[in-house]
Amino acid sequence: MIRWFPLSIVLSLAAGPALGTPAVAYEAVKVTDGGSITGKVVFAGTPPPKRKVVPTKDREVCGSGIREVDQILLGGDMAVQEAIVYLKEVDKGKAWPKPAKAPAIDNVKCDFRPHVQVIPAGDLEIVNSDPVLHNTHGFLGKLTVFNVALPNQGQRITRPLKRTGLVRVECDAHGWMLGWIHVADNPYHAVTAKDGTFTLADVPPGSYTLVAWQEYTGAVEVPVTVRAKEVTSVPVELKKK
Ligand SMILES: [Cu+2]
């Protein structure tokens, strides 16, 4: 059965991006009676204008025209794409899935790919696909968690991300470049699809706090109760603070 939570329980906006905390002990256990959380993240409000950026260097690679950068990616019905969704402070649950590929962020035509991603604490590969120097710099709050110069095309450098939390990625050579990495402390997380939907499966029955975050709006927290072998549907609304 599907359990609908009314929108009115959507709680307070969290105070800014989470500062990093040392990885809490997460215990992987066999989940036999887990439930699922599904939902759709929508934006409430007036969509912001695109950010206009004019590359001032490396124009042969970065482009010489005006770049229009989305502050929020919206699909139909104000669905929010590329929002990060996760459960907060989970002490035990399913095992971490084996990643399909090693976590990586690539510099491509003076943009980060992917723009938004969730990875487990551990190694991150930083790649330069461009024939120009990028200096990829990750911040957890104000703390630098990696800072690497990649002068050569095809270069790959691995750095450990030990602390969990939201990492903002910038390029010291190209001020407009911006990417986001949520370093997760448990495997219950997702990035929303084009239609704003997400699913978190095999959640042990219990009460949780679901967090949804997007770079323009910031975060919102929603309480969720998961019952054994049931699907709980959670609508999530993001608005600009
Ligand atoms: Cu760069």
Image (cartoon, helix red, strand yellow):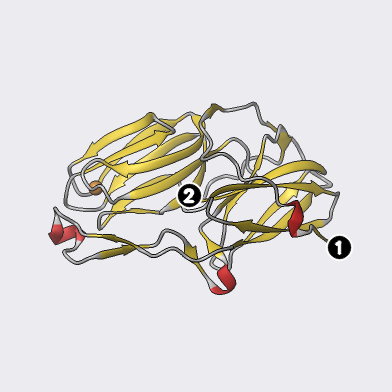
How far apart are the alpha carbons under marks 1 and 2?
31 Å
Q: Which residue is mark 2?
A: 117
Give amino acid for label 2.
Gln
Quarter the N terminus occupies: bottom right
Which kind of residue does numbered mark 1 sit on? Met
Q: Quadrant of residue 31?
A: top right
- Return the residue nearer the eye: 49 or 56: 49
Query: Residue at horizontal 73%, vertical 34%?
Result: 92
Task: Give above or below for 23 relative to 187.
Answer: above
Give the mark count: 2
Q: Is mark 1 within 8 Å of ligand 1?
A: no
Q: Which mark is residue 83?
A: none
195 with respect to 145 (left or right): right
The image's mark for residue 1 is: 1
Residue 23: x and y in percent read 57, 28
Residue 205 found in image quarter:
top right
On the image, the x and y values in percent for residue 78 come to: 56, 69
Q: Position of residue 145 (x, y in %)?
A: 39, 30
